[in-house]
C-alpha cells in the first residue's frame, strides 16, 4: 500500500515539475487534500505555493506534518512561516526547536539570534546550546543578551561555556554560581589553563569535565580533551582518550550522542575519528542523512548494496524528507540508473524549496532517457534558479 501511494505521489510530482511551473490549480488541490486530512499529498501541492496560504492554513499543515511524523517537512514549513514576520513569535520558537531536533544546529542558532532581546528562557537555552554545539562562534554581545533572558542555572552555564570557547574566561566565570555543575566549572577552568599553556593542569580539569550526567556535554568535552592532548603533542594520552571512546562505542554506552560526538571531532578537524563514529552509526542501521552524507564517497565504492538499503530506510522513515530523497537521487546518479535519478530527483525538487543542482541532475537523466522536451523544462528551471550555464548543453538553453 505504501509503495503504491509513494508511486502515485512521485508520479504527481513529476507531472507538476515537468510542467515548468506550479499548476494553477495546485494551491486549490493542496488545500482540498489538507481539508481531507491527506497531509502528504497536501504538502506535495503546497510546498511550492506556501505564499498562497493564510496563517491558519499554515498552522494546519504544520500540525498535520507533525502528527504524521514528517519532521523535515514540518521544519521547512515552519521555517517559511517564521520568515513572514520580523518579530519573535511562537512560530519562530517552534521553527528553531524543530531545527534543533533534526540536528540543524546552525539553522536553529540563526533563527533565534536576531531576536535575542525577545527570547524566553526555553529559546535562550536552545540558542546557546546550538551555538555551543557549533563551536561557540556567536558574537559575545548576543551570548550576554541571551543569558540575560533567563536566570536558570542551565542557561547561565551555557553562556559560560560559549564565552570560554571564545577566550573570554574572566567573563565566563561571572555566569558560574553555586548551582553550576562541577563538570561545567571544570571545563571553563580547563579552557583558561590551556590558553595559559598549563598543559597538565588543564588536562586534569578537562578530565573532571567528563564526570557529568549530561551526555551531550560529555560528547563535546571528550572531543575537546582529545584536541588538548593532540595539540600539546601528547599522542599517547590522546590515544588513551580515543581508545576510551571506542570502548564505549563497542559497549554501546553512547545512546543518542554518537552523531553529535562525530560532529564534534569533525568540527575540530579530526576526520579519522569522526568517520569511525559515522561508520559505527551506519553499521548500526541508523538511517540519518548526516551519517550517510559523511560516508558517501567510501560507501558508494565499498558497500553500495548496504548504502541503498539504508537510503531506502531513510526515505521510508520520512518520505517527505528533502535530504533523504536527495541522497537517493545521488545514489542512482552515481550508479548511472537514470530512471532512479528522475524518480527521486522530481521528489527532491518538490520537497527542497532551495534546490538548484537537482534540476540539472534530472535534466541530464532525462536526456539519457531520450526525453529531451521534459529535460529542457528542468534545465530552464535550473538556470532560473541561478545555475551555471556552462553545465547546460547548448541546445538545451
Image (cartoon, rainbow, N blue to C red):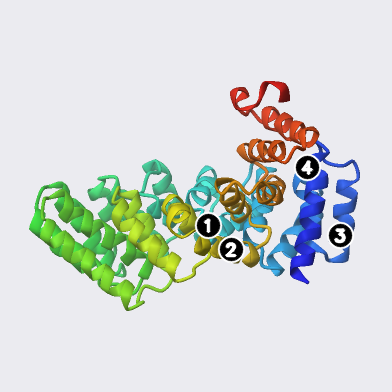
User: What residue is pinned by disc 2?
Assistant: 314
Task: Tell me, yes or no, if residue 55 can be seen here.
Answer: no
Percent position of residue 71, x then y: 63, 61
Instruction: Of the two numbered discs 4 and 1 on the same chain, state the one appearing first in sequence.
Output: 4
Mark seen at residue 33: 3
User: SS for tag 2?
Assistant: helix
Q: Percent position (x, y) of residue 274?
A: 34, 57
In this view, 231 is above or below 2? above
Can residue 1 be seen in the rendering of this structure?
yes
Residue 165 pos. (x, y %):
29, 49
- Residue 289, numbered label: 1
Quadrant where the N terminus is found in the figure: bottom right
What is the spatial separation of the Cα atoms under label 4 and label 1, in whole angstroms?
24 Å
Q: Earlier in the sequence, mark 2 or mark 3?
A: 3
Task: Give residue 312's mark.
Answer: none
Which is closer to the viewer, label 4 or label 3?
A: 4
Amino acid at each position: 500500500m505504501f509503495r503504491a501511494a509513494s508511486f502515485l505521489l512521485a508520479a504527481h510530482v513529476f507531472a507538476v515539475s515537468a510542467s515548468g511551473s506550479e499548476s494553477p490549480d495546485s494551491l486549490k488541490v493542496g488545500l482540498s487534500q489538507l481539508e481531507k486530512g491527506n497531509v502528504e499529498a497536501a504538502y506535495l501541492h503546497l510546498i511550492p505555493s506556501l505564499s498562497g496560504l493564510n496563517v491558519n492554513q499554515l498552522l494546519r499543515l504544520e500540525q498535520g506534518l507533525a502528527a504524521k511524523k514528517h519532521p523535515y517537512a514540518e521544519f521547512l514549513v515552519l521555517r517559511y512561516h517564521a520568515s513572514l514576520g520580523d518579530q519573535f513569535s511562537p512560530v519562530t520558537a517552534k521553527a528553531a526547536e524543530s531545527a534543533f531536533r533534526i540536528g540543524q544546529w546552525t539553522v536553529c542558532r540563526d533563527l533565534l539570534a536576531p531576536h535575542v532581546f525577545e527570547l524566553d528562557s526555553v529559546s535562550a537555552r536552545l540558542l546557546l546550546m546550538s551555538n555551543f554545539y557549533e563551536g561557540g562562534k556567536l558574537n559575545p554581545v548576543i551570548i550576554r543578551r541571551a543569558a540575560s533572558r533567563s536566570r536558570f542555572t542551565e542557561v547561565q552555564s551555557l553562556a559560560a561555556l560559549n564565552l570560554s570557547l571564545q577566550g573570554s574566561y574572566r567573563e565566563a566565570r561571572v555566569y558560574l554560581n553555586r548551582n553550576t555543575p562541577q563538570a561545567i566549572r571544570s571545563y571553563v577552568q580547563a579552557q583558561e589553563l590551556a590558553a595559559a599553556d598549563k598543559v597538565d593542569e588543564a588536562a586534569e580539569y578537562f578530565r573532571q569535565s567528563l564526570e557529568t550526567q549530561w551526555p551531550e556535554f560529555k560528547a563535546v568535552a571528550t572531543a575537546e580533551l582529545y584536541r588538548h592532548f593532540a595539540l600539546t603533542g601528547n599522542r599517547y594520552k590522546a590515544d588513551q582518550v580515543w581508545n576510551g571512546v571506542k570502548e564505549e562505542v563497542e559497549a554501546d554506552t553512547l545512546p543518542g550522542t554518537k552523531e553529535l560526538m562525530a560532529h564534534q571531532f569533525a568540527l575540530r578537524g579530526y576526520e579519522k575519528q569522526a568517520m569511525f563514529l559515522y561508520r559505527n552509526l551506519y553499521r548500526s542501521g541508523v538511517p540519518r542523512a548526516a551519517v550517510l552524507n559523511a560516508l558517501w564517497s567510501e560507501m558508494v565504492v565499498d558497500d553500495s548494496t548496504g548504502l541503498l538499503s539504508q537510503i531506502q530506510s531513510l526515505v521510508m522513515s520520512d518520505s517527505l524528507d528533502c535530504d533523504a530523497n536527495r541522497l537517493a537521487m545521488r545514489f542512482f546518479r552515481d550508479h548511472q540508473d537514470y530512471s532512479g535519478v528522475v524518480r527521486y530527483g522530481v521528489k527532491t525538487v518538490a520537497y527542497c524549496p532551495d534546490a538548484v543542482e537537482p534540476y540539472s541532475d534530472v535534466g541530464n537523466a532525462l536526456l539519457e532517457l531520450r526525453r529531451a522536451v521534459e529535460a529542457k523544462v528542468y534545465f530552464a528551471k535550473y538556470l532560473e534558479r541561478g545555475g551555471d550555464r556552462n553545465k547546460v548543453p547548448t541546445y538545451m538553453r
